[in-house]
Image (cartoon, grey):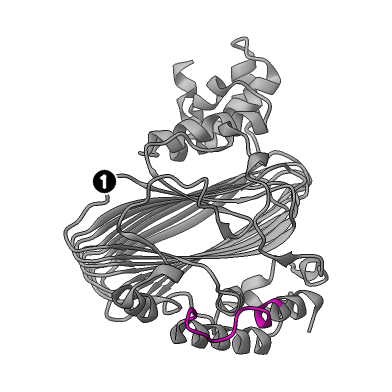
Amino acid sequence: MNDFKRQALSLAKELPEQDLTTPQWLQNLRERGSQRFQAVDWPSRRTESWKYTSLAALGKVASFGAANQGDPASFPVDAWIDADAYRLVITDGVIDTAACGELPAALTLFADADDAQSKIIEAHLGRLADSEQHLFAAMSEALLQQGVLLHVAAGVKLDKPLYLVNRISETAAPLVNTRLLVVLEQGAEAEVVEHYATATDATKGFVNAQTEVVIGDNARFKHYRLNLEGEAIHHVGGVFVELNRDANFDGFAIAKGAELIRIDYGLMHRGAGAHVELNGVYLPRNKQLVDYHTNVQHCVPHCTTNEVFRGIIGDRARAVFNGRIHIHKDAQKTLAQLSNKNLLTSNKAEIDTKPELEIYADDVRCAHGATVSQINDDALYYLQARGVDKDQARIMLSFGFINELIQQLENQAVLGYLLPELAHQFGRDVDLLLFDGDDLDSI
């Protein structure tokens, strides 16, 4: 057993024992998680799902401590998204009640759940994020202390998005464990923005953030996951979604900044007529590593999936993308598309991409593909010939590569926040990010 697992299990043992404030279902979940986390081998290069992402350095880390809320003042005001939304703030793994705004009645902290809410949590928590298959889902169960339930009743639309801010202050180096459970009943609608941030690039910590979403019949869920952390953060997380009849999931993910980001998406079509729209952008630089693993399961007929991920990898950074679509034998009339395109802006940058289709039905329309390229010299010359500086031309072409996905964002507050963030990363004016690389003919 390596130092990381040993410390995580030690922290799990320090959690409060069964008492009047700790429900039995939570205690059972912790015990199950500890047993599974202890039993599962640490991933190595021989572990298929971790083949291109080494956790050797993480396994030697023994300096993370238990979550203990640090200094909220270390976050400048402009580090938050200015949105008309319900705001829930978690600082260093602890609910920061002073920083939270008004919260909807549909939201409940696990610790405050009544009997009916506890039954919902017990019925769904840990069912989609399978702790037998996902090492860090098991770790999440073992360390589970605080969690958030968003339960939207049948036919109800959440009037404002839920803005969930997970931040690590510069005064701590915690092992942060967060859990979000979303349950939408029939015909319900909700939107959630998960924003992960740090006070500075030097802020240290490990984040394990697992999200489970149950979308009922004819319900709609829009989800943003923004991983915008500092250089010293290790972040492992997952988004696991179950779609029932005519359900709709619209997701967007972006990752940049952290030393290691590994996100698993597991989406399962359980009811006919369900639709998944999943877009993602990753922008590692320096020596950062971003790893997205997606797995879409079509279990029933007449469902659709459209998945698009694009990456810009610079300096000595690495990216991994493994997208899998599994069409079960009964999933006739499926329509599924998967696209992964990557742009390398350095000769030392690297991408490992592996799109997969596994089809057992014979009446389907499916397509998948991946590309890896560098900036086109002809396009670069074309812009320079029209008076555009070479460095600016490279930025325009680079962001034209992802601008289509960025500009599709319906949440204008998220869009308005991301554009300056992206401009700052590359040291360029935000106007350059509005150029579409497909529009060279219009210049």
171 to the left or right of 406: right
Prevailing SS of the magenta stretch: loop
**Image: 297 above or below 148:** below
218 to the left or right of 10: left
The spot of residue 79 in percent (x, y) is 58, 36
Q: Secondary structure at mark 1?
A: loop
Q: Residue at x 54, y 52 (%)?
A: 96
Number of dots carrying numbers: 1
**Residue extending furthest toward the front:** 20
443 to the left or right of 218: right
- Where residue 155 sits, quadrant-wise, is bottom left
**Quarter of the rendering occupied by the N terminus:** bottom right
- Where residue 337 sits, quadrant-wise, is bottom left
The spot of residue 234 in percent (x, y) is 70, 59
Query: Is the residue marked by circle 1 packed among few (<14), some (14-19), or many (20+) residues within 10 Å?
Result: few
The kind of residue on which mark 1 rests is Asp
Residue at the spot of label 1: 159
Q: Residue at x 77, y 44 (%)?
A: 286
Nearest to the observer: residue 118 or residue 295: 118
**Image: 367 above or below 74:** below
Q: From which residue to which does the magenta span run?
A: 11-22
Nearest to the observer: residue 346 or residue 10: 10
The spot of residue 362 in percent (x, y) is 29, 75
**Image: 189 above or below 181:** above
The spot of residue 254 in percent (x, y) is 54, 47
Judge whether residue 404 is colored magenta: no
Nearest to the observer: residue 237 or residue 202: 202
Q: Residue at x 57, y 31 (%)?
A: 78
Q: Residue at x 23, y 68 (%)?
A: 333
